[in-house]
Amino acid sequence: MADPVPAVTAVEPDPAGFAPLAARALTHDGAEAAEILTRLATPPAGRHGVWLRAGDAGVVLVSRNDKDSAVAHVDLLAVDPGSRRRGIGTALLRAAEQAAAGFGARELRFMGNPPCYAWPGIDVRYTPAICLVEAAGYERFRTAQNMIADLTTADLSTVDDEARLAAQGVSIRKATQDELPALRAWAERVFNATWAWEIEQSVLAPGAGCHVAWRDGAVLAFAGHGANRPSWFGPMGTDPDARNLGLGKVLLRRCLAAQRDAGLESAQIGWVGPIPFYARTVAARIDRVFWLYRKEI
């Protein structure tokens, strides 16, 4: 007789305690399991999330969308490989749906919940997860992708471009904590609070970094790495009034060079939009593909 499915209960976030399970379950992300859990356990202030655990066999995190309270997200679902095909994933998913409905959501998504997320959706290589959600009636509604940059071969030089920009009064440097108020205010005005939070994390998180272009004390553009995942690059943005100066190329290469100097051989460019830009600038190629799912609950 198969072992009974452990009861699913709400628990406090415990990144260190969950890490061994996550490392076993997340076969394509195991090396960063501890960092992923730590980031998900420290979301922006005011975000409502519920952690649910099925003994030592599985864990799920569901959070409310910060902009639309009718939408909730599954940020993490991990089942120990040795405990699969026993109904544990189904029990965790059912509990996640009940938790989401309990705080007012009408739709549950397997989709990253910016600004604090681990994946855009479900990596297509996680076949058991795709089988689980499709059997549970979730609809695939979008595709997202990462690109990968080989830091051992990519041209990451910026000397000539920085000299050209300096002649135009533009300076580029790594941001400091003292500059965060100005950076946050600029990001919220030009972009949104989501990127403002990610900028803050890229400045504060260990091993992360944010490089910024300035002119006459004003921010023109930024690029960050390590805000959500140590090996991931992004986000990056340029003020509309400062486009066509070539700032993105320089900021991207500076970030990737910092990741290379930290010992990484490759970097993931997360949730990519402008694919040709990254391919042209650092010879990046499409790497991880994610399917995004949703269901009315």
Image (cartoon, rainbow, N blue to C red):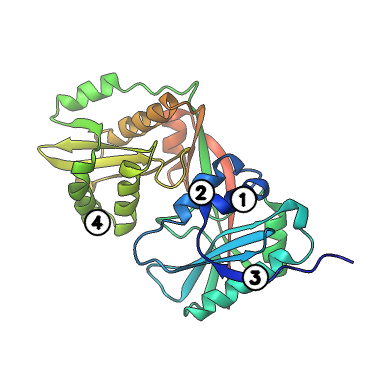
Residue marked by disc 1: 22
**CA distance separating discs 2 and 1:** 9 Å
Q: Earlier in the sequence, mark 2 or mark 1?
A: 1
Alpha carbons under labels 4 and 2: distance apart: 25 Å
Count of numbered circles on the image: 4
CA separation in Å, label 1 and label 4: 34 Å
Q: Position of residue 54 (x, y in %)?
A: 66, 65
Q: CA distance from mark 2 to mark 3?
A: 22 Å
User: Is residue 5 left or right of 36 when viewed as pictured?
Assistant: right
Sequence order check: which comes first, mark 2 or mark 3? 3
Q: Amino acid at mark 1?
A: Ala
Mark positioned earlier in the residue sequence (1 or 3): 3
The location of residue 161, given as percent across then percent down, is 27, 24
* Mark number displayed over residue 8: 3
User: Badge 4: few (under 14), some or many (20 or more) residues near its Cα, within 10 Å?
Assistant: some
Dots 1, 4 in contact, CB < 8 A: no
Residue type beneath disc 2: Ile
* Residue 84 appears in the picture as rendered: yes
Residue contact between numbered discs 2 and 1, judged by CB atoms under 8 Å: yes
| Distance of label 4 from label 3 (alpha carbons) | 39 Å
Q: Secondary structure at mark 2?
A: helix
Vertical order, 37 against 147 (above or below):
below
Q: Residue furthest left?
A: 216
Mark 2: few, some, or many residues within 10 Å (few <14, many ≥20)?
A: many
Circle 4 is placed at which residue position? 188
Task: Give 103 or 196, whichever is nearer the viewer.
Answer: 103
Which sits in the foreground, 27 or 244?
27
What amino acid is found at the position of numbered circle 3 in the picture?
Val
Q: Residues within 10 Å of mark 1 (few under 14, many from 20)?
A: many
From the viewer's perspective, is 145 left or right of 261? right
Q: Secondary structure at mark 4?
A: helix
